[in-house]
Structures are given as C-alpha cells and as structure tokens.
Image (spheres, rainbow, N blue to C red):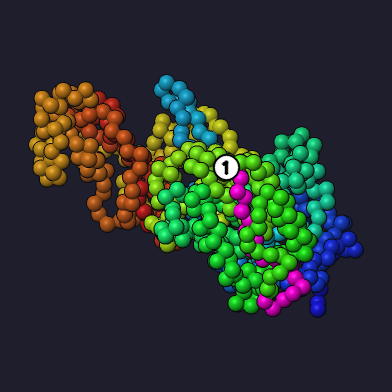
Amino acid sequence: MTILDVKSFAAGQWVDTDSSARDIYSAITGEVIARAGNLTLDVTGMLDYGRQVGGPALRAMSFHDRARMIKALAVHLGQHKQALYDLSFATGATQKDHLIDIDGGIGTMFVFASKGRREMPDDTIYLDGELEQLSRNGSFMGHHVCTSLQGVAVHINAFNFPVWGMLEKLAPTLLAGVPAIVKPATATCYVTEACVRIMLESGILPEGALQLVSGGLGDMLDHLTNQDVVSFTGSADTALKLKSAPHILQNSIRFIAEQDSLNASVLGPDAVAGTPEFDLFIKEVCREMTTKAGQKCTAIRRIFAPQAQAEAVISALSDRLAKTVVGDPRDAATHMGALVSLAQKRDVLAKAEILSREAERVFGDPDGFAVMGADQGAFVPPMLYHCADPDQAEHIHAVEAFGPVSTVMPYRDLDHAISLVNRGQGSLVASVITHDPEVAREVTVGSAANHGRLYFNNRDSMKESTGHGSPLPHMVHGGPGRAGGGEEMGGVRGVMHYMQRTAIQGSPALLTQIGNRWVPGAPQVTHHPHPFTRSFDDLDIGDTLKSDPREITLDDIETFAHFTGDTFYAHMDEDAARRNPFFPGRVAHGYLLLSFAAGLFVQPDEGPVLANTGLDKLRFLKPVSAGDSIHVHLTVKQKTPRNDDYGEVRWHVTLFNQDAEMAAEYELLTMNAYS
C-alpha cells in the first residue's frame, strides 16, 4: 500500500513532511495510510505572506467580486468531488456521510456566494445598521461601517468534517476579504489537503488567499496580531489552552470557539406513541446517533421523554437501531461506518464506561456485535443508555462520548424537561418534537439562552425540515458555555467575525462618499437629463430630479376611494376624520400620494428603466388635505450590479407639501439596463 505524504502549502509552495511527521491510520483497517507534519515549517513566513500578499489582493476586490470567486470555487469543487469521496472512505465515513461533509461544504459556499451578491454591496465597505442623526438639523450624522481586518484568519478544524469544517469557515472569511491559513486535524488532513489542492490548482484564488498546515502549527499563534483571527473547532480542553495563552490575551486577538456540546432532544408532552411526532422523534434520534458514527458536534447525546413514554421510546429506538448495519463504509449496504481511528474508539468506550456508572446500557454491546466486511477497524455499535434518575446524575450532563452513544431520560413535566436540558451548561443545538405551539413557546423562553440553536419539528414541517444535526449557513452555528461561546455562519453575520465595525461620524456629504450611499442632507445634482433616460452606468450617487407641484383636490380623493374601494372614514367623512387626533379633517389616501408622486417623477418613454421591483421604508409623515399640493425629490441613493444585463438602483423619494414640509418618504427599487 502506498502511504500518502500529506503536504503543507506555505507561501506559495508545497512543503513535504519531515522526520517529525505522524502516522495516520485507516479507520477501516487500522493500517498506516498517510503521514503528516513538518516542524521546520516557516510559520512566521506564512503569516507575512498572508498579510502582505493575500490580504491586499482580497481587499482590492469588492464583496461581489469575492462572492463570484467563492461561487466559482464551489462549482469547481463540485466537478471534482468524486476524488474527495474516494479518499474519505478511509475516515470511516459512508457515502451518505460524504454528502454531509463534501456536498454540504460545497453547498455552504454557494449560499455565502449568493448572500454576498444579494445582501452586500458591490463595494469594499459594508454599512451596518441604520443612519443615526446626531444633531438637531442633520448636519452631523453617524453610521457604523465594517471593513476587512488587515491580518489573517487561522482556522483550526476538527477531524470529523475535513471538508465542510474547512469550507464553512473559509467562505465567510474570503467574503470578508481576509486570507486564511487552514490547519485541519491530523487524523483526516489527507482529505482536506486534497480539497485545498483542487482549489489552488483551479487558479481561481488570488495568490496568498489560502495556505495549509498539515500537522502541527508550531508557535504560529505566538506571532498573531490584533488584526488576526483564530477560529477553532475541537475539544474544550484544547480551546481553553489556546485561547488562554498570554499572547492571545495580551493582544486581544479574536478567538472564535466551537467545542464540546451535550446536545439534547425533547419529545414533547403531546407526542405520545402513535402520533406522527413520536415516530418522527425516533427517526431523528436514530439518524443523529448513527450519521458519521455519531461523530458530529451537533449529535444528540441526551434524550428526554415524558415519564409515561420513556419505555416506549427505549423500545422503539432499540428496534430501529437493531436494523443499523455496521461495517465497511465502502459497501453500499452499510448504514454506519467506523470511528475515525482506534484511538477515538478507545476514547468513546472509556467515556461510555463513565456514563454506565449512572445509566444502564439498554442497546448495543461493544464486545459482541456484527461488523460487515471488516473486523480490524475502529468500529463500535450504536449504544443506547437509560438513566432513570436524571436529577441525581452528574456525568450524563457533563461527559460527551463522541460517537454513537446517547442516553434516554424521563421528565415529569415541561418545566422539569427544560431544567434538565439546561443542565448541559450550553449547547450548539437542542431539538423539540411537538405539535403544541405553547410547548414551543415555553421551551424557547426557558431554554433558548442556553443554546445556539433551537430546532422544532412536527407533522407540519417534517417533510422539508433539514434535521436536528444540520447547521445551515443561513443560521448561526455555535453556542454559549460548554459549546464555546462562539458563533459561525449565520449568513452575513458570519462574515462580520473577520471585519472591524467602526463608528463613522461626520457631515452627510462625507458619509455619502465613505459609504457610496446617498445620505439626506448631502449635495443633490439636478442639472443632468431626467434620470429615467440614463443607463445604470451613467447615473451617479446624488443625481436628483425635483418635480413640479401638483394640487390634491377633493375630487381626486373621492375618485381614488371609489375606484379602489378604500372608503375609510378618514378620506370620506369630514366629521369622523376631525374626531381622529391624527387628522385635521378628510385627508388624501397615502397610496394616492404615492401614485401621484410616481406620476410626477416617471418619464413615460421606453428607456433603461426596466422594472420597479420594490418599495422600502415607507413612512407617511404629515397628512395631505384637499387644496394642498405635493412635489417630489427623486435621488439616486445606491447602485448595485445584479447580472450582466442590469443593475439595481435604490432611489430616495421624498414628498413635500406646499410649505416644504415632508409628507412622505420611502426608497424605490428599480432595475436599470447598462449602457
């Protein structure tokens, strides 16, 4: 058998292992299949290369440029994923497990690419939150902006997801404009190295954007600065050791940790045997116990059922687990493969022995179970325990056997269930299977503060739900307390971990220039031709149309009321309208004003404006009565390219009355053709 030499990629060069390299073993056979490590790796050179070469190249790209790059990487990886499948079997993973790790990682990149294009500007500065008026007349304003950190992100990843674990960190990091140094767990680093090699050989990434350490980091973390970030996934002990290092603390270096988690699943009081929720619960728990042989940071470790349902849950879980075929993951008939290594098998069995001091094993004998097609690897059966007295138990709520091991515990009522779930002292996810909205509400109020994610499922959502154990790129992944106190993903939130939020204060003109978004009070340019006659490229931020006035008549109001059917008393009954504290008498409909405003600023001829696609932040500020007149200011607020044919223009629209008082304000979205 050829033993793989797992290389590192440092400062633009592939670096071989040296005599310090560690052996890596097949999860299936226990044989040595690879070696990784090099104590002479120039870690300071890698940091300098990322900061001086990769960082500037990424920061020169807009968010949209980076999003297109990430999408191209995802497409390229999708074309080469079979090679990753073939390697990943040796980690003990089945083909279904590959879909979570490899396809899941690629899918995460697609989501971040999409969010980068849809939710972030075609710029290098991200505007966070709303504009703040800091002065009486609006001449001094404030806004929060986010800009790329000028360092590197060091990603330290766990063994269980050698592809997803890297890509779910890499996508938001690259989108933020920060280069990454990836350090995978040595046990499965050969899969990560192959994935990195595919990305680098694509030529899609700028030089210095991605480097790889296969083996130990050496003293790299001692050379980080306040512009660098460490993002860690692994054990709580290792996380504590790394993040409490004096250099990390003294320099306030960002440290994002995702670590141990005793995730729980609760069978709702309403979900009795025979209901769709009961059956769903059994299916979810079994899936979470056996997928990746239970080696998931989100796997269910603690199972809570109403006292009256505990025996039925144990029986149903045992029956379903008995159908699980354990064996060679390369065999399509296998349901659950091996743990990642014999060392991990020893650790899982040792932790299971600790759990057995407080719980009885009711299914799965590690000394007597069938393994299909292999007998030397790191195989264990699914093991189900029953703890009859969860209130007195300590280990059950504190010890994680990182494998196919879970414990059933009874609860008396929902308050008791909530208190037991919270005994985990912080988790990545807790799930509740219930069809009762009040149960969902009570669990959220009583338990959400202890979890990074709450997953509710029932007969209404089960066909489309993604599962207890699936962190989605749209939602935050992380948790308080034992789970590490960190956050990853969560859409654009995940990008912000690699950016600095800064409060910017100044005049409207300066804030407009900084953010590439027009701020009320900034100059308006009115001497150009009508903006609807000009292409996306020809429009500039601040270009403005100021319309002629139009008088609102009582006939206008009544015609609009009868035509639309909106005969609300404030528009039709003078006496009733006067009794309303908001109105001086009969007033014009708000949507009549919007319609007339469009008539005042629209240029009717065919031109570059293709469609009106939305209206945001509408506010009616002052009533308009018959005899009043309105005029409109239409200003280019922001421009965002959308595809090869057109871009989105966000217009700031203000309606004034005859006394120059603001009557309404909103943002109009149009799609405009390029030149």
Q: Residue at x 19, y 36 (%)?
A: 589
Residue at image point 81% right, 63% down: 36
Q: Which amino acid type is marked by label 1?
A: Leu
Q: Which residue is mark 1?
A: 420
Main secondary structure found in the magenta portion: loop
Of 22 and 337, the residue lying toward us = 337
The magenta stretch is 372-390
Against 30, residue 573 (above or below) is: above
The reply, left or right, for residue 489 in relation to residue 29 is: left
Asked if residue 567 can be seen in this view, the reply is yes
Q: How busy is the neighbourhood of tag 1: few (under 14 within 10 Å), some, or many (20 plus)?
A: many
Occupied quadrant, residue 577: top left
Vertical side of 331 occupied by 181: above or below: above
Indicate yes or no whether the magenta region holds residue 366. no
Q: Position of residue 139 (x, y in %)?
A: 45, 25
Q: What residue occupies the far top of the structure in this picture? A: 136
Percent x, y for residue 221?
Answer: 78, 46
In the picture, the quarter occupied by the C terminus is bottom left
Q: Place residue 481 in its image quadrant.
A: top right
Query: SS class of the residue under badge 1?
Result: helix
Does residue 115 sit above or below 293 in this rendering?
A: above
* Percent x, y of residue 315: 54, 61
Which residue appears at 71% of the width and 50% of the height? 357
Which residue is depicted at the point 72% across and 76% down? 374
Residue 4 in view = no
Given residues 661 and 184, the one toward you in this image is 184
- 242 vs 459, nearest the viewer: 459
Spot the residue most to the right. Answer: 19
The residue nearer to you, when weighing 267 against 82, is: 267
* Residue 626 occupies quadrant: top left
Q: The N terminus is located in which quarter?
A: bottom right
